[in-house]
Structures are given as C-alpha cells and as structure tokens.
Image (cartoon, rainbow, N blue to C red):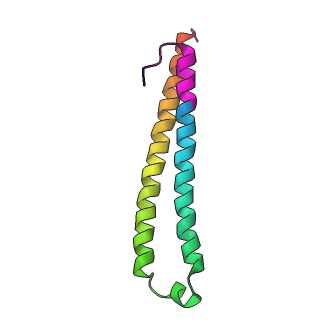
Amino acid sequence: MKAPRTPEEHFARAAEYERKAKEYRQEAALHKKMVDDEVKALPPKLRSEPEPGWLKKMRRHCEDYMEKAQALAQEAERFAEYHRIRGKEMQGQ
C-alpha cells in the first residue's frame, strides 16, 4: 500500500476505511447476536440460575471481540475523515 498522492486517491482511501468500519461494526453485531441467541436457547431453568460456565466464557470472548471491533471501526472512521479532509485540501477547499 502506497500513500495517496492525489485527491482522488485520498477519497478512494476514505471509502476503503468507511467500508472497513462498516465491516467491523457488522462483526461486532454478529458476535452480540451469537451471545443473545445462546441465551435465548437456554432452557428456562438455566436462565434463572447463575450463567453456565461455558456461556460465561463465550460471553467474555465475544464481548472482548466486540470491544476490539468497535475500536477498530472508530479508528477506521478517523482515518476516513482524515483522507476526506486531505483530499479536499488538495482540491483547494
């Protein structure tokens, strides 16, 4: 990957980072849904007791992943904003 040199290259890079941010957020949502689906699939008796150990491990894994994916999405959005601004600056705006 080379550094963008033209406004068009900066705008293209911004679009790439926007796509990545969207994908990271979708990954986070997918992991949230997996945990929610597992909780819903528990027999009613297990829902009122302390959370089963396997579900607790899964929840921790997924929550950690969701947190990291959200952080990557935010970083990608900051990169996209930088490239949009830089592209406009190069156009004299």
87 on left or right of 1: right
Q: Is residue 78 visible?
A: yes
Q: Main secondary structure of the magenta part?
A: helix
Residue 21 part of the magenta-drawn span: no
Q: Quadrant of residue 18?
A: top right
Q: Quadrant of residue 3?
A: top left
Give the x, y percent position of residue 35. 52, 69
Give the x, y percent position of residue 63. 45, 62
Q: Is residue 88 visible?
A: no
Give the x, y percent position of residue 26. 57, 51
Give the x, y percent position of residue 69. 46, 50
Q: Is residue 29 above or below residue 47?
A: above
The extreme bottom residue here reads 45
**Front in this rendered view, residue 46 or 1:** 1
**Count of marks placed on residues:** 0
Residue under the image location 43 percent in, 57 percent down: 65
Residue under the image location 41 percent in, 64 percent down: 61
Q: Is residue 65 above or below residue 76?
A: below
For the record, the magenta segment spans 3-15
Residue under the image location 58 percent in, 88 percent down: 44
The extreme front residue here reads 1
68 on left or right of 80: left
> Quarter holding the C terminus?
top right
Residue under the image location 42 percent in, 51 percent down: 68
Q: Is residue 84 above or below residue 49?
A: above
Q: Is residue 85 above or below residue 39?
A: above
> Quarter holding the N terminus?
top left
